[in-house]
Amino acid sequence: MRNYHFCISGNNEILFRSEEDYIRGFNTLALTVAETGAFLSAEAFLSTPLHVCLRTDDVAAFIYRFWRSYTRYFNNKYGRKGTLGGRPNIVEIEGFYHWMTAVCYVLRNPVHHGVAPTPFAYRHSSANAIFRNETGKGVHGILLSRKSYYKYLPKGAKCPQGYMMDSSGLILRESVLDLSDIEHRFATPRSFLFYMNRLSSEEWRREQDDDRIDAVPITLELLERNVSLHSLSEMLKHEHGRSDYKAVSDMELCEKIDGELLPMYGKDSVYELSEQDKQQLLKHLHSDRRLPERQVKRCLVMK
């Protein structure tokens, strides 16, 4: 088996429009991990993009199986057709520091995109599952009985015996992650916290020289090369804390569009809107409500 990082980006299209989508997305990833015998090291589900680090025999087959299942769900829910997202960006991970850098960048991705002030403030990633007890996260709340799992999984899917699910229908990340390997590599909770708060710099690249491998160093540019959401300078600005973390998120805006505005047009999905309808909503949300034009267009699936 080999270690890989892969990224799937929708760029001008949202991949996860609601909490239900995030739950289904991770649950589908978790089932694919179990079905293929892969080992999950890190993941971060943003509205777009999605980043994953894992160990597997066949990364292309893994992505196809996982993303085909989620795309089928998404297309059925929103009355959409065709491929969801662009071509995956796949990078093989070959050394210890290569792995460490890739995993840290994935867990810190919400910070790079300005949607959270720290990796631990973002719910849809595995950051809070690593050294959970040692970092004071404590135990989970109410867990569902196994007979309720089917409500939150693809039709006909079987949940592995070792997987547990919380009251929202989300498979616990601790059930899926290869925690023994991850925590062994970070060595201590303090070391893990250090890496989660460490800024991007040339030091990350220099450390990878110690792996003594003939591989392209892991960098933010390499892992984000298929993502046009933010420029490198914007991501570094976000990393230094210069972001409005209280701004309306993509999910909040999508839920407003899908739940409040679409009924006014007699539509069930944003994909049913005409270009004229979208232009009217763009004017309302950008000009009247002062929301960023780029964000509004992304949530309305406009180029």
Image (tube, helix red, strand yellow):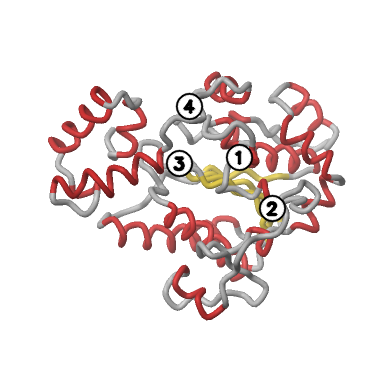
Q: Measure the C-alpha gap from mark 3 to mark 1.
A: 18 Å
Q: Secondary structure at mark 4?
A: loop
Towards the viewer: 230 or 126: 126
**Residue 65 appears at what percent x and percent y?**
49, 63
Q: Earlier in the sequence, mark 1 or mark 2?
A: 1
Q: Measure the C-alpha gap from mark 1 to mark 4.
A: 20 Å
Q: Measure the C-alpha gap from mark 4 to mark 2.
A: 27 Å
Badge 4, how many Cα within 10 Å: few under 14, some, many 20+? Answer: some
Q: Is residue 267 left or right of residue 202?
A: left
Disc 1, disc 4: CB below 8 Å?
A: no
Disc 2, disc 3: CB below 8 Å?
A: no
The residue labelled by disc 4 is 230
Q: Work out whether 137 lies above or below 146.
A: above
Picture quadrant where residue 213 is located: top right
- The amino acid type, in three-letter code, at marker 3 is Thr
**Residue 242 appears at what percent x and percent y?**
56, 20
Q: Residue at x 75, y 27 (%)?
A: 205
Towards the viewer: 40 or 151: 151
The residue labelled by disc 3 is 48
Q: Residue at x 59, y 48 (%)?
A: 125
Q: Residue furthest bottom?
A: 147
Q: Secondary structure at mark 1?
A: helix
Q: Secondary structure at mark 3?
A: loop
**Dot label at residue 129:** 2
Q: Work out whether 97 lies above or below 157.
A: above
**Residue 48 appears at what percent x and percent y?**
45, 41
- The amino acid type, in three-letter code, at marker 2 is Ala
- The amino acid type, in three-letter code, at marker 4 is His
- The amino acid type, in three-letter code, at marker 1 is Ala
Picture quadrant where residue 21 is located: bottom left
